[in-house]
Image (spheres, helix red, strand yellow):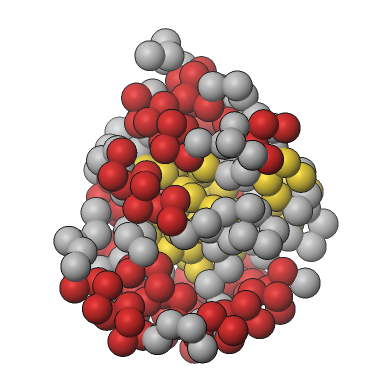
């Protein structure tokens, strides 16, 4: 199981690097970019903010493209193409074992483009929140299905103290109801709520999943629909129902030019 492997991985990593080490690294960094603000600043009915994802492989899909196995994968080039074609923010997979990601990608991406960057990984320990900040992330993903309530709240508080945005992700209705009271804590401008359209137990996606849960969302302006978004029609369907932020990854990364794929998704001419 991915989460159990991650817990073992983190325990081993703790023996190599301490939180004090991360504090020293953070002292050399500037403030994080405003991930929350980059996504919610356009509340109009015609705008859709896209978190464009950089991903080499996944347990369900394998290698997204054959060339991503080796030097054909260039996260900086992809980030630049996303930026040029309308992305509001970047999501970067950093898990090595299952997604072939790397933490070093975050700094490289931030050095190349002015967009804020989400560290997308399985965060199971506060140590990883410190690690995320030290390696240049502007936001972290917190998956409700992998955390109990106290763990989730503690990490949201720590993220806020480190000036990171938390994208709190749920799939089930039960977990949405569980985390709903905490979205916006301790400050609204540091939290986003993600609904993952992919069922992690079956790896099946259904875009309508977001729409089924929409009435249970207190503040749709901070809602992010994740996974299963492939076409311009998908964007229009979500936008018609009031969804203003999406996270899109695999459908873009399968394209030879992910930036051009993003432009098509947004109904724009690629640059």
- Taking 270 as reference, is 23 left or right? left
Residue 61 x %, y %: 76, 43
Query: Is residue 82 in view from this perspective?
Result: no
Residue 86 x %, y %: 36, 27
Q: Residue at x 46, y 76 (%)?
A: 128
Position of the C terminus by quadrant: top left
Number of numbered discs on residues = 0
- Taking 251 as reference, is 155 left or right? left
Q: Residue furthest top?
A: 269
Query: Is residue 121 in view from this perspective?
Result: yes
Q: Residue at x 19, y 73 (%)?
A: 27
Quarter where residue 126 is shown: bottom left
Q: Is residue 42 above or below residue 29?
A: above
Q: Is residue 54 above or below residue 235?
A: below
Quarter where residue 49 is shown: top left
Residue 36 x %, y %: 30, 54
Q: Residue at x 49, y 19 (%)?
A: 260
């Amino acid at each position: 199981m991915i989460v159990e492997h991650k817990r073992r991985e983190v325990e081993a990593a703790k023996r190599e690097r301490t939180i004090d080490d991360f504090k020293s690294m953070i002292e050399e960094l500037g403030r994080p970019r405003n991930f929350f603000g980059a996504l919610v600043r356009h509340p109009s009915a015609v705008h859709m903010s896209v978190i464009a994802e950089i991903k080499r492989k996944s347990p369900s899909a394998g290698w997204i493209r054959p060339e991503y196995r080796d030097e054909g994968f260039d996260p900086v080039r992809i980030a630049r193409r996303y930026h040029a074609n309308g992305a509001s923010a970047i999501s970067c997979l950093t898990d090595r074992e299952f997604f072939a990601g790397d933490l070093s990608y975050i700094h490289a991406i931030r050095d190349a483009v002015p967009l804020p960057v989400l560290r997308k990984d399985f965060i199971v320990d506060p140590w990883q929140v410190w690690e995320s900040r030290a390696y240049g992330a502007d936001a972290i993903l917190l998956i409700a299905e992998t955390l109990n309530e106290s763990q989730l709240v503690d990490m949201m508080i720590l993220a806020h103290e480190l000036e990171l945005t938390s994208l709190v992700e749920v799939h089930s209705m039960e977990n949405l109801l569980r985390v709903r009271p905490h979205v916006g804590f301790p400050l609204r401008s540091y939290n986003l709520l993600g609904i993952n359209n992919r069922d992690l137990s079956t790896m099946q996606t259904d875009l309508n999943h977001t729409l089924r849960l929409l009435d249970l969302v207190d503040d749709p302006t901070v809602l992010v629909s994740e996974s299963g978004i492939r076409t311009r029609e998908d964007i229009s369907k979500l936008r018609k129902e009031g969804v203003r932020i999406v996270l899109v990854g695999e459908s873009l990364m399968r394209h030879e030019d992910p930036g051009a794929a993003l432009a098509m998704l947004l109904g724009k001419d690629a640059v």
